[in-house]
Each structure stands twice: as C-alpha cells, then as structure tokens.
Amino acid sequence: MASKFGLSGGIPDRRIRPIWDAVDSRQFKNALKLSNALLSKYRNSPYALALKALILERMGKNEEALSVCLNAKEILCSNDSNVLIDDLTLSTIQIVFQRLDHLDKASSCYEHACTKFPNSLELMMGLFGCYVREYSFVKQQQIAIKMYKTAGEERFLLWAVCSIQLQVCCGNGERKLLQLAEGLLKKHIASHGLHEPEALSVYIALLEQQCKYADALEILSGKLGSLMTIEVDKLRLQGRLLAKAGDYAAAADVFQKVLELCPDDWKCFLQYLGCLLEDDSVFTKETDPIHTQKGIESKNLPISEELFDSRISNAVKFVHKLMMEATNNSERGPYLALLEIERQNLLFGKGDADKLAEDLIQYFVRFGHLACFTSDVEIFLQVLDKDNKSGLMKKLVKESEASIGLPTKALGQSINLFKVQNLIGDMFALPVDELEDVAVRMTEMFCKNLPLSKELDAQESMYGEELLSMACSVLVQLFWRTRDFGYLLESIMILEFGLTIQRYVWQYKILLVHLYSYWNSLPLAYERYKSLDVKNILLETESHHILPQMLGSPLWADSSNLLSEYLKFMDDHLREHADLTFLTYRHKNYSKVIEFVQFKDKLQRSSQYLMAKIESSILQLKQNSDNIDEEEGILESVKRGTYLTELLNESKSLNFNEQLKLRPWWTPTSDKNYLLGPYEGASCCPTENLHDQIKQTHADVLKTIEKRSLLPRMIDLSIHSASASVKENIETNGSLVDPKLSLELKILLERYAKILEFPFQDAVELVLGASRGQKAFEAPNLVIIDLMNFAVFLNAWNLNCHEITIPNEDNSDSHSSTWNIVNTLLRKYVIDTIKSAGPIVSSPGSDLPFLVQLITEPLSWHTLIIQSCVRSLFPSGKKKKKGTSVEQLNSQLSNEIQNSIQSLCETIELVTKWLKAQLQKPDNEKFEMIFSSIQRNDKGNGSGKAYEILDSSVSSMKDAEVGDRILQALHSWHPADVVRKIVAGQGSLLSEFLKICELKIKSLQVLRHQW
Amino acid sequence: MTTIRRFCCDDLLRFAPVNLDHLTETFNMSFYMTYLARWPDYFHVAEAPGDRIMGYIMGKVEGQGESWHGHVTAVTVAPAYRRQKLAKKLMNLLEDISDKIDKAYFVDLFVRASNAPAIKMYEKLGYVVYRRVLRYYSGEEDGLDMRKALSRDVEKKSIIPLKRPITPDELEYD
C-alpha cells in the first residue's frame, strides 16, 4: 500500500507537482484546470479526485468539493483491487472532509484502509488522528491499544492511557476506567520500564486522580523518579502528594527545601504555610475565577492553639533565615511571607492588627516604589478594619514624606499612596472638594515628573503613567456625584493629553473607549478600540469593551465586521484545535492532552461565542427588515430561526472567558453602568460590590441568551401567521395557518414572557393596560424593549387565533385590535424618550441606544408583519383593480394594516425630526457648549481645575526639562480637537440612525401606495 | 514575589494585561498551541500574588549537530512588574533547560535593530550580536541575531560573530 518512489497516490510526481505549486501560490483556477486534465487520464484515481476536491474547497465551492470527495471515498472504499490506498490519498481526503465538517467520513475512509491493511501502523496512526478530531475517546483508546499490541511501543500505550483519562475527565467514562489505565501502565513498566518524563507525569497524575498518593510517592522516590530532571519540580510534586496524603509535616519539610532553592516562590510559600497549619484549602483548585483572593474568611484550623503558635514561630524563623541568606534585594518573597504569617495570625484570632500595619509600613519602605506594591498588599489590607486602614494610610503618608530617595522612587511611592487610598475605599467617601483636590494633585504630579521620562525611548512606558488613569477615575466619580459634565470632559482631556505624549498606553485607550461610548460618541470609541489591536485570543477576552454597545447602535457595518472577525477566529480555531491536540500525542507531551481538550471545551462553551452567533443573525435581520424577501432568505439560512433555538438547547453550561478586571470601576460589566443611575452616597463603593455584580451579570447573561435566541423563530412564525391571516380573509378556501405553527408561536410567547418573569396572561394584561395608558411599563429600558417585542409577536399570533379581544372604551360592539396596541405603545415610548432627551452633545448616557433599539427591533419586526400581510394581498407588488382581493378583505383588517402603516410612519417621522434638529445645530454651537464646561473663568469650585494644570504645564515646559521628543508632543496638543472629535463622533452616530429611519419611512410609504 | 510555572492554555485567557502592550505580539492560536504541544518546557509564565500574570517566555529547541540550540521566541513582562529582573529570571530558566536537559550548544534570539533598551538588556545577560539579518521584520527593519554559548560549547564557537550580514532566506530556521 505504500507509495512507490516517484509516485504520489499512484500518479507520477511530475504530474502532481505543478498542481500543488498552483495551490500553494493560490492560483486555484489554474490548479483546477491542471487537476481536470489529470482526471481525464486518471479517471478513477481517488488521489486525483481528492486533489480536485481540495482545490474546489479552497475556491469556496463547498458543495461541489463534497460531491467530488465523496466520489473519491466511494472508489477508495470499493473492493476494487486496482484501487491504490495510501496515506497520501487518505490524508488528502481527510483534509477536505475536515474542512467541510464531515469528520466521520474521513474516519470511515481510514477505517476501511485499516481493515484492508490491518498491521499498518501508519494507517492506524491516521485513524487515531481522525478519532482525536472527532473527540471519540473510546475509539481512540481501542485503536491505540491495537497499535501498542502491534508495535509494543511506550508511546502508543500512553496514547491509550490518555484516551482513557479523557473518557473520565471530559466524557462520560466511569472512574474505574482509571484502574484499567493504571493496570496497563504497570504491566508495561514491569516488562519494559518507562523512558519518557512525560509518561511518568501521566502515571503519577493517574494515581493522584485515584487518590493513591502513597503509591505515587513511592514511584516518585524510586528509580522512575529519576526521569524528572528538574529538581524543584520533583520536590513541588512530592510536597503536594504528601499534603494530599495528609502527611503535612513531611510536606512542609519538602516545601521548605523548595523555598531554600526558590525563596521568591509565592505559591510554594502558601503551600508551606498551609502544611504547617494543616490547612488543605491551598491545594484545592480555585473554582471561582472572579474572586481568587479570599482575604477575610476566618479559618477553623484543625490544630490546637499551642501547636499553631509553635508552627507559626517556626515559619517566622525560617523566613528570617531566608532573609539573611537573600542575595537579591529585589526579591519580595520573604517580606511578603512575613505579612502572610501575620494575616494568618489575625484570621486565627490571635493576631495583632498593629503588627500587621507595622509590617506593611516596612514593606512600603522597601518596595513602596514598585508599580506592583498595591496589588501585592491588597489581600493584607482586607483583614484590617476601617480604623486600622485609615491609621495605616496616615502612617504611610508620613513615611513617604520622610523618605529621601531617587525622584523615580519618590514618585512610585506617591502613586502607591493614591492607590492604597483608592483600595481602602476612602476615595468614595471623600467630599467633592477634596476629591477634586486629589484629581488636581495627580495631574500636577504627572506633569511635574515628565522630565523624568526625558531620556526614555519613545516606546517605553513613562514614569507616572498611571497617574492620569487614576485622575480620570476620580474625575468620573466627580461627574457621577455632581452631574457636571465638565468633569467628564476633563477626564477625557487628561487621557488624550497622555496619549499625545505616549501613544501606546492601552489603559488610557480602554478608559476612553468607555467614556466615548457613554457620551454617545461611539464611532470615536470604536476608533480607540481599534487602536488597541485586539486580535486572536484577545478577541475572546477583550471584545466586551466595545461589542455590546456596538450591537445596540446604528453602526451596523462596523458591528457586523466586529462579529464576523470574532466568529471567524472562534470557528477557525475550534476547527483546527484537535489537530493541535494530535500534535501533543505525536510529540509525546501527554500531560498537555487533557489540558488541550478541556481548553477547547472552555472556548466552545463560551457565552460570548453563543451570544455572538445569535446576535449575528439578529443583526442581519435588523439590516434587512425593510425588505421581507431578503429577510426570508436570512431566516432560511438559520433554518427559519430553529437553528438558534437548537444552538441554545445544545449548549450545556456556559463559560465566561471575558477579562472583566480591565474594565473601569463605573462599568464593571457590560450590562452595568453606575453613571446611568444616581450617586448613592458614600456607603456605595462600586469596587466593593464587584463580586456580586459579576455574579448577577452571569446569571442575567443566561436569560438574555435564551431570550435573544427565540427572536428569529418568533419573527419567522409571525410573518407566517400574518400572511395566513390575510389569505384566510380573501380566499374562499383560504389557507388557514397551520395550527402547529400557531401553537408554536404561542408556546414561544409563553416562554418569552416567562424569561421576563411574567406568566403569559400577566404579560398580556401589562401590554393591554399600558396601551390604554392605565399603567406604563415601569421598567428599565431593556425590559421595555423585551415587552415591546412581546407585544409585536402577540399581535401576529392574535391575527389568527383572535383570542385577545379588547372592547372599545365606548362599550360599542366594535373591538379595538392588538394592531392598535402595538402602534400606540411604539408611539408612546418614542414620544416619551424624545421629550425627556436633552441635546445629545450635552447628555452623556442618554436614552439614544434605547430609541435606536426601539426602532430597529420591535418596530422593525412589526413592519415585517405588515409587509407580510401586504405581500399576501398584492402578490405581484402592484395595486389590484377594484373588485378583487382587497375588496374582499375583511375591511377591519384592511383598515388596521393601513392605519398601522400610517401610524408607524408618523412615529418614525417624530424620530427623524428630532434627529434632524440635533444635526442641524451648527457644530460651533455644540463645540462651545461642551468646551465651555471646563473653561473656568475663576469660578471657584467645579470642573476644570485639572485641565487648567495641563494647560499651564504645556506652556511652561521647556526643552531642557523634558527633552525634544516630549516637547514636540506637547506642542502638538490641541484640546479643541478633542472636543471637535467628540462632536463629530456624535454627529456621525446620529446620521447613521437618521439614514436607517429614512429608509424605513420610504419602505412604509411604498407599502402605503399599494392600496 | 514570583511563582514561575509552565504556561498552560488557560493562561491565554488571562494574559491580556501583558499582551495589550504594543511591543508584545499576540500571535494566532496555532502558534501558541504548537509551542505548548511541542516544547512545553520552553514556555513558562511568572505569576504574582493573586494569580496575576507578570510575564512569560516562550521558546523552542531546534537544529542539528553543533547548531542544536535553544531559541527565545518571545519574552515579555507587564509594565507593573518591570525593573525587577524578571526577564532575566525567565531567560535564565530557558537557558538552564537548553543547557541541562536538552544539552544544546547555545541559545539565540532575534531583536529589532532599533530596540536599544532590549539589546542592552540581552547584552547584560551575556548575549552577543552574532549577525545582522537584513530586513528581517516585515521586510522593513533589520533584526539582530544574538547568541549566548552554553556549557556544551566549550570553545564558544557558536558565538563568534559573522562578518557579513545575511538575508532572511539564508536563515537556517524560521
């Protein structure tokens, strides 16, 4: 079966090479031509066919590629003895099937080949690869065992063992399978020993998974243990096994040895101390990724007070010894260790807070200039009470004032003082004028210390860079408290100023993304986001800074790009992930196998990934909602909406991979923005509520995903229901709506209402009541959108089942309709929003996103329902002569449709009028309105002070002080440009929205003219 | 206070504060995962208290005969943890593995010719400029191939500088 020399898949190389050359240089047309020529000579060659399929797939002709590849498979799997089966042909077929998402077909080709040549290792390895790609752990195991039996090689046994572990860790396999794996390894070791360090790791892990710690320790200290060549790694493992076996004393000794070799190893110190105190919590893996630091939980340790004292004193002695022996002054390890010991004392109820504070001061004296000082000590500050904290703060300030050192060190210390103050929550308790003073001091400090960065390379971080981010945070807080938007502008100004000097500071850019988003200048926020160069895996962890705002905006093209870039990254990676897992097997890095598979699972279950898939369909539906025929095409591509509900059903538990830590304090999650609500007094410290907020968001995300996934199906059913209701009216044997579809819509409506936490009937009552003006939805904007969506689909459903009848207020026999309810509510919310909205330029955090969503979602779905009715009335799109269907149409329905068109037109016109009024204001006027907010004219208190510092610094800075590069940057600083850009950003956002509205009016007018 | 351990897949979801830095490239997934799958001993991460990522190093071992060497593909430290000799620690670790486990002759790395602060740091760590690679970076900027001899190269032959610059297509490895 092996390829002969000079032949590829049985065809001379010289005929194949030009085809591959063309493929490699992406000349697919030429490649296809050559491949067709080859096929005319080798009509039945599976390899020639596979090559053609590969070219077709690269050209994007997937269906054709699949059919050619299936042909190749058929010939390959026929029992024709003339057909050559070799690995080259198989692997080419495999690649094509993999790219076309038909992994099972590739596997069956290899299965056939393996049956035909049962002892070929090469083919069995190929088949093993197929099963790895399919995540078929049991089949992997079976073929690996077969390979092991054939060749007797250690690596194949390990492939089998890993496959067994995967069944237990990532599949449905029972734990007792591990015993089987252990038995296989034991038997092999007895006869052949072990030769790879990674094989030993797997063996130990296998024993650890079965809690056979003593066995694992024995192996580690025996002959096999010598496979582990890095001594500290071996010791760490030994320590962990001893601790898990409950032999804390021996484990502590081992960790002590590790610390003697690596005195700066923090995790090891925690394990050492954990063993001394017989506290095994340090060995259990942290399951809550949000809050990894459990700083203040007091502990019930299993040891007596005397024992605790003596062990702690041993630890102190040991740490002092480490300090004495330290050769490197920059090692923070032993000093932090003393703090941790003191913290443990406090948690055990024996500590002295003053002593901890004293140690913290000593730590400050030594390391207070480092940028990581505050994050290092965060966990220790948490155990101090309020008084201790403020006492400490005062002492730190004193210490810093007394210390004499290099200016860079002094600056570092001062920055850390601000950070500690922020960390202990003091900033949120300060009165406004003091807070203002903090922002001013921070800005001043930054400007004063600019000369320190004189010699730095243009790409290096500046000294004191953090001061501007911190000042920004303070200014935003001032805005939250006072609603003086001058502070908001100031916060933007100082960040933009910082970027003028050093254009790479990502922290400034992230803050600006959120500030511009909040201030309705989304295009500008997007610009800043793009400059962060978020790509590859960062798309999964950092997209949350912009994606949610964009999805709710009228910037459809940019949103669509964002979504498709992200989805492409995820899809592509998930498709190739298993190939990379196979690589770990082939390079004998077995310990990575489970890690890779678990990681794939994490990405596949990403909540953002699922959300993006759903939102991408909804976005397309929004973009095409003015054209029902286009809309039908989109619905068709998602299996009339059922694809999304299936996606939801398939997704088990969701994973949250977003890095929320990098978000600013005022918007800790994408669905929470403190600035949208009032300042709740000094007791409210958003940073302290972070953990609960994130938990809440995660719970809400699940609901949102379910809710959004139902929309496309409800739209589809509504369109169907609308059209059937018209036909029912105008045709003698009118096609009644399929009762199944009507029932499905009802079920979905009930489910939708349930997600909104209403029984169906209550939701109906709420909608009816609100339309009669009895009670408006007293709910956040997002819930109103949901209820409006509900009302729109309720109307569609009611067109057929007529279950909801509303008596007119005059108690006459005629009935008002659900059409009317939807029209009234849409108009009501638009009017309310416009009435309460101030000028966009000076209304950060306005209801603009709500208005956009109202028009582009419920209102758009409603127009689709109308379009569906009209299409059924006028199938050719033209007016009908009198006496035809329109005439026969129940006059009430006809009136209702016409009235709805009229009403929607008027509603959107209200919006366009408002938008035009906003846009017509001269830019200069808007500019003045914003810029004047920070121009102080000696107004005493209020915004503008920090900005003033920047202004005066720029004019007083001299070349000799800051160097040529910084001076040039300072000269290029034009604050007015910042304001102009904000205004322009707001303008382009409004214009995009206006365009959408105008197109909607146009399409409604076309409908109106059909009557 | 630093814990240095093997880099694992989950770290990819947490390294944004390091990788958002404009000098740190975020490669595609197969790049990271190939390194993890093939040379897990050459991919290490440093963590601070609170499991914060301080920086990481990724590299590989490759070559034949006397060209068998460790290679530093990327080494990076987050701004908050700079000026603490962390890069040195990470580099020493990779050198140690190349030297003691894989018995390589030398360790090499490429650096932009304009990146003066980095070149200075590598020189401090014992690296010398072995040769210049013309237009190595996106066909625009020259790269410097810097090397440090390991114990197996007793006569330090591997680091005798080449007299002429080379072009990227003359490089033995990618």
Image (spheres, coloured by chain):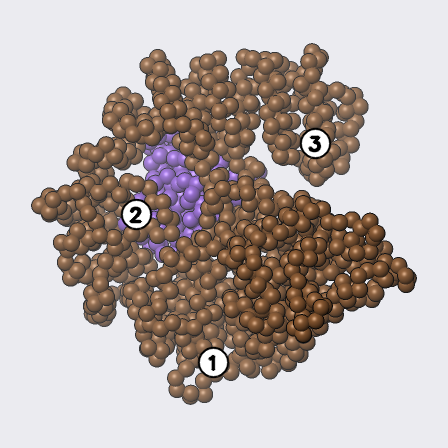
Q: Where is residue B108 in the image (x, y as percent from the top left)?
A: 43, 39
**Label 3: element kind:** helix
Q: Dot 3, crowdedness within 10 Å: few (<14), some or many (≥20)?
A: many
> Chain coloured purple: which letter?
B
Sequence-earlier tag: 3 or 1? 3
Q: In this view, does A465 lie to the left or right of A89?
A: left
Name the residue at 42% across, 87% down.
A939
Q: In which quarter of the image is residue A226?
A: top left
| Eye-nearest disc, 2 or 3 | 3
Determine whether, in the image, residue A344 is placed left or right of residue A676.
Answer: left
Per the image, the residue denoted by label 3 is A66
| Percent position of residue A583, x then y | 49, 30
Name the chain under label 2.
B
Please state, as top left, top right, bottom left or bottom right, where the N terminus of chain A lies in the image: top right
Mark seen at residue B2: 2
Q: Chain A is drawn in which colour?
A: brown
Same chain, labels 3 and 1: yes
- Label 1: chain? A
Cα distance in 3D space between marks 2 and 1: 45 Å
Question: Which amino acid type is shown beneath numbered disc 3?
Answer: Leu
Residue nearest the viewer, comparing A765 with A863: A765
**Left or right side of A843 for A791:** right
